[in-house]
Image (cartoon, rainbow, N blue to C red):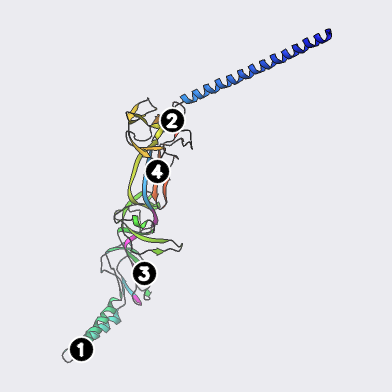
Amino acid sequence: MLKQVQHDIIYKEGTMKRKIKIIIICIAVLLVIGAGLFVLKTLLSKKGSEKVYYTANLETYENIIEISGTVAAAQEQTLQARSAGTVTAVYVKAGDKVKKGDVIIQLDDSEQLYNLEKQEYNMATKKLTASARELKLLETERNSLLQKVEDRKVIATFDGIIADLDVAVGDSLEAKDTVGTLVNIDYLTAEVEVTETDVSKLKVGQTVNFTFPAYGNKSVTGYVTGWPAIGEITSRGATVVKAKLRIDEYPEEILPNFSFTGKIEISPTEQYVVVSRYAIGYENKQPYVVLAKGNEKLSVKVQPYGNEYVKVLEGLEGGEVLIQQTTPKRSGMNRNRNGSGSGSQRNGSGGNGSSGAGGFPGGGFPGGPGPM
């Protein structure tokens, strides 16, 4: 009996110790959870109070057609002998200016002059006895001989400059032998390929900006003069139209046959300020921004620009750092990025609406006090 009582007492004491141990463990777990929740609340509170900054980006929009090619002189004449013979005179040299109709090269024309004089003698002796039809035939023969005399000369067909000349007195030439080039460089021209999808954008008079490697990649301005009413298929299988361009004023460093890249302006280049819509606050339905530098509040005029951004029409110049005024929704992709101060977009044959430097325009970045 005594042993049974002692056993019950020992059992009860063991059970009590286990209960106390369980209670202590539960209290410790609750303390740890409570401490964790406190730390998490503190971190969330700190994060919630952290300011977010956005950069107002100056975006450039170009609606253009990108082109490349080489320029040509306004007019160009290949100097060729029109018949075979020996050169008896060369009246100019490379670099000389000539007028339309000036003789550049003379071939031996003694035989042609003899035949012409003989024909004129025959016409004079038969003038009184020949019929009208005979006289007309003699006149036709004379005109043919006159042309043969002219064919012994190389003549300028327009006002210009002798670009090159490689001939000397005594040289023997065959018909169609090339001896030089005459150019008119009052202005320059070019033909460029425009894809069929861009032809509808072309207009006569559109501004063209040319860039020449020979001119330090500086810009030279020209314009569109026209294009044919029919397309052509290139060796690549693409359908294009060859638009005609012209440059009236150009630096002396640019010469015919120099290469270029360029842009046909479909519409004037535009610049505007873009920023995240979360940088915009509203007071009495009037938009405003707060500058990170000095917390200055500025009234602005904006319009939507996609889902996440606004275009600032008035109030900002671009490059300003702004304090976040509204909180983005947590659902969906967070598009806040560290933005740059400027960017560009272009819409043309090279690609549509591609974004310039800086990724998403006007991206945000947390921290303080932010760039100034």
Q: Relative to 145, say whether 9 is above or below.
A: above
> What is the number of the mark on residue 36?
none
State yes or no: discs 3 and 4 in contact (Cβ < 8 Å).
Answer: no
Q: Is residue 55 visible?
A: no
> What is the number of the mark on residue 327?
2
Q: CA distance from mark 3 to mark 4?
A: 51 Å
- Mark in the foreground, 3 or 4: 4
- Mark in the foreground, 2 or 4: 2
Q: Relative to 3, say whether 97 is above or below.
A: below
Q: Amino acid at mark 3?
A: Val
Q: Relative to 110, say whether 41 is above or below.
A: above
- Disc 1 crowd rating (10 Å Cα; few below 14, some 14-19, many 20+) is few
In this picture, residue 196 sits left or right of residue 141: right
State yes or no: discs 1 and 4 in contact (Cβ < 8 Å).
Answer: no
In this picture, residue 98 sits left or right of residue 277: left
Looking at the rendered image, the quarter that the N terminus falls into is top right
- Give, as a single range, the part of the protein colored magenta: 66-86
Q: Amino acid at mark 4?
A: Ser
Residue denoted by label 3: 179
